[in-house]
């Protein structure tokens, strides 16, 4: 993640003033929008994303009428994205999409979808991919957005929608070099649907009967052992106190142990959900690799 200084605007102003003074002091240096863009691109390529953003922003301040301003604003979004500041990147891409629709709508909308996907906002991601897909169907990022829809559906454990999105891809983009990968993806979806899923209800019920057994069912073996031992100790202590007719102690031990018992049930159900989620995420990653899709 990038660290953003709280005095970013002041820093930018100082840089601009210093740069202007330097230019007045040396006639051999001529700052142009092309040079400013080159500086930003160089920092971006080197992975220095914050400095890249600064250079792109300087271009928009120094050359507000340049025809490279849309490109600089788009690159700001790219730098934020690569720096893993996905919220700022999404805002940047939305601004570019709304302001420079003629040239950057599809690319900006597609990357906006990638940002929302990283943020776990699946519905917003699909909406952005849909915008990219329909604005200019011939744009390269329109086909990328179509694949993005398929992968987002896979991540949400919705293989039916994922399959339909890939089928639509074949219909809308015949001859695309990813067509063989799409056919392979259908096989991956078949394999995923054939895999048995874990039932959260069953996991919870098992752990209600025998603490820890639901976790074992969900293949969280260590959690299952811990739940069994901890709850077993509380149950054994409560039963022992009752057998010795020490009902006050039994109430205390049982009362303390009750939250652990209930937590064991919820933990088993949650472990089952995590198991299913890991399968859907694995499917998404396999599809992305098969389709040469980078996110």
Image (cartoon, rainbow, N blue to C red):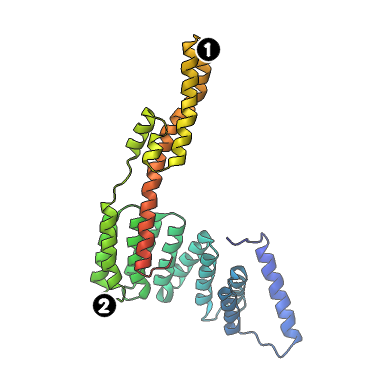
Disc ID at residue 248: 1
Q: Of the residues tagged 1 and 2, which is closer to the observer? A: 1
Question: Please, what secondary structure does the residue beneath circle 2 have?
Answer: loop
Q: Residue furthest right?
A: 25
Give the quadrant of residue 192: bottom left
Residue 75, percent across and down?
52, 73
Residue 258, percent across and down?
47, 25
On the picture, is 292 further left or further right than 54? left
Earlier in the chain: of badge 1 and badge 2, it is: 2
Mark 2 is surrounded, within 10 Å at the Cα level, by few (under 14), some (14 to 19) or many (20 or more) other residues, namely few
Residue 237, percent across and down?
50, 20
**In the image, residue 252 above or below residue 146:** above
Q: Nearer the viewer, residue 194 or 153?
A: 194
Number of labels in the image equals 2
Q: Which residue is mark 2?
A: 175
Question: In which quadrant will I find the C terminus?
Answer: bottom left
User: From this viewpoint, is residue 108 visible?
Assistant: yes
User: From this viewpoint, is residue 145 visible?
Assistant: no
Question: Please, what secondary structure does the residue beneath circle 1 have?
Answer: helix
Q: Residue furthest bottom?
A: 28
Q: In whole angstroms, how far apart are the C-alphas of marks 1 and 2?
A: 77 Å
**In the image, residue 294 above or below residue 37:** above
**In the image, residue 222 above or below residue 19:** above
Question: In which quadrant will I find the N terminus?
Answer: bottom right
Q: Nearer the viewer, residue 109 or 219?
A: 219
Query: Going 38% across and 29% down the picture, which residue do you hit?
Result: 210
């Amino acid at each position: 993640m990038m660290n953003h200084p709280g005095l970013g605007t002041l820093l930018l102003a100082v840089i601009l003033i210093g740069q202007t003074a330097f230019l007045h002091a040396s006639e051999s240096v001529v700052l142009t929008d092309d040079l400013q863009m080159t500086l930003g691109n160089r920092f971006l390529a080197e992975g220095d994303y914050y400095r890249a953003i600064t250079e792109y922003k300087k271009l928009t301040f120094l050359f507000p009428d340049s025809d490279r301003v849309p490109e600089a604003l788009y690159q700001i979004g790219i730098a934020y994205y690569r720096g893993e500041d996905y919220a700022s990147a999404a805002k940047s891409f939305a601004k570019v999409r709304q302001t420079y629709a003629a040239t950057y709508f599809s690319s900006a909308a597609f990357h906006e979808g990638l940002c929302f996907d990283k943020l776990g906002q699946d519905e917003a991601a699909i909406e952005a991919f849909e915008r990219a897909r329909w604005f200019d169907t011939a744009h390269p990022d329109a086909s990328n957005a179509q694949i993005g829809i398929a992968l987002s559906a896979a991540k949400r454990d919705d293989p039916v929608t994922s399959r339909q999105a890939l089928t639509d891809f074949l219909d809308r983009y015949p001859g695309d070099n990813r067509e063989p990968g799409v056919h392979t993806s259908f096989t991956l979806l078949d394999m995923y649907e054939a895999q048995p899923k874990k039932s959260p209800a069953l996991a919870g019920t098992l752990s209600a009967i025998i603490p820890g057994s639901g976790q074992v069912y969900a293949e969280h073996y260590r959690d299952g052992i811990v739940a069994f031992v901890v709850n077993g100790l509380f149950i054994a202590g409560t039963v022992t106190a009752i057998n010795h007719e020490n009902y006050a102690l039994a109430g205390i031990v049982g009362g303390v142990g009750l939250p652990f018992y209930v937590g064991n049930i919820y933990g088993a159900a949650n472990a089952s959900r995590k198991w299913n989620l890991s399968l859907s995420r694995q499917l998404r990653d396999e599809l992305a690799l098969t389709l040469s899709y980078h996110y």
